[in-house]
Structures are given as structure tokens and as C-alpha cells.
């Protein structure tokens, strides 16, 4: 069982930045960030492997950066040039065949 705790959400104006952190009880090969806006499904934002290979959803490429520190059991998401459409609850995720989720953290971007 992997326990994940997110932090760092909040409110920001469009064009601003936020940094999310995820503390994991232990790290899996694939860690990631997903988001869910009201009335929409939960979608992948970014994932990263233990080897550092990152994958991004098209709309966040060039604005968001995912990183991990396995020595600290942490996963990060740096979000720059935020847009109102980035507003969602952001979830830390671990695993592929069996998936674990954090409780989520709200990100609100106002125009």
C-alpha cells in the first residue's frame, strides 16, 4: 500500500505559478500527477519514471515540469503560466497495474 499526500495547491491569477508536492510512503517506478475539473473525468497531467523519463499532456507541455526525488520519497509538479482551464483538483498517483491516489489538492486559476 502506497500512501500519497499532496500539498501546495491554492489560488493564483492567470499567468502565475504554483508548485505542488507529493510525499509518498515509498516510490514506485511510475509516479504522476492527474487532475479532475468539476463535471469532468480525471485526466493525466504528467508522469515520470524512476529513470527520469517524463510524459506530459499536450496542453501543459512547456508550462509544467514534473520531477521526483527518490531519496526523499517526493514527487513535484512545477506549474508556470497557469491558465483558468488548469483549474482542477490535482491528484498524485503511483503505479501502473495497481494504482494509488492521494487525497487531492485544489488549484484555482482566475482570469
Image: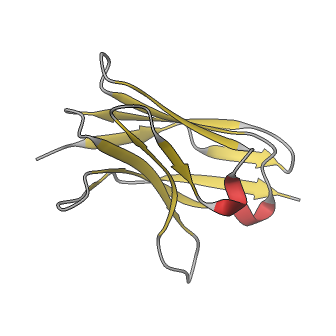
Which percent across, then down, holds residue 13?
84, 48
Q: How many marks?
A: 0
- The foreground one among 97 and 99 is 97
Q: In the drawing, does residue 85 fall left or right of residue 5?
A: right
The colour scheme of the drawn protein is secondary structure
Which percent across, then down, holds residue 87?
67, 61
Q: Hey, which quadrant is residue 98 in on the image? A: bottom left
Residue plotted at (25% across, 58% down) = 96
Q: In the drawing, does residue 34 fall left or right of residue 97?
A: right
Residue plotted at (74% across, 44% down) = 63
Residue plotted at (56% across, 83% down) = 39
- Residue that lies at the very extreme toward the left in this rendered image: 1
Relative height, residue 89 to residue 43 (above, below)? above
Q: Check the picture and name the quadrant holding the C terminus.
A: bottom right
Which percent across, then down, holds residue 35?
52, 62
Q: Hey, which quadrant is residue 25 in on the image? A: top left
Residue plotted at (45% across, 39% down) = 53
Which percent across, then down, holds residue 9?
58, 43
Q: In the drawing, does residue 60 fall left or right of residue 23?
A: right
Q: In the drawing, does residue 9 fall left or right of residue 12?
A: left
- Residue that lies at the very extreme toward the top in this rendered image: 71
Residue 87 visible in the picture = no
Q: Hey, which quadrant is residue 10 in on the image? A: top right
Residue 85 visible in the picture = yes
- The foreground one among 108 and 85 is 85
Amino acid at each position: 500500500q502506497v500512501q500519497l499526500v499532496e500539498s501546495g495547491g491554492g489560488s493564483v491569477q492567470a499567468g502565475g505559478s504554483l508548485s505542488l508536492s507529493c510525499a509518498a510512503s515509498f516510490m514506485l517506478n511510475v509516479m504522476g500527477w492527474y487532475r479532475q475539473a468539476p463535471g469532468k473525468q480525471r485526466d493525466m497531467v504528467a508522469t515520470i519514471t524512476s529513470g527520469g523519463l517524463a510524459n506530459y499532456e499536450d496542453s501543459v507541455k512547456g508550462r509544467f515540469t514534473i520531477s521526483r526525488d527518490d531519496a526523499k520519497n517526493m514527487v513535484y509538479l512545477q506549474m508556470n503560466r497557469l491558465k483558468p482551464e488548469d483549474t482542477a483538483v490535482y491528484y498524485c498517483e503511483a503505479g501502473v497495474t495497481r494504482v494509488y491516489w492521494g487525497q487531492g489538492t485544489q488549484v484555482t486559476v482566475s482570469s
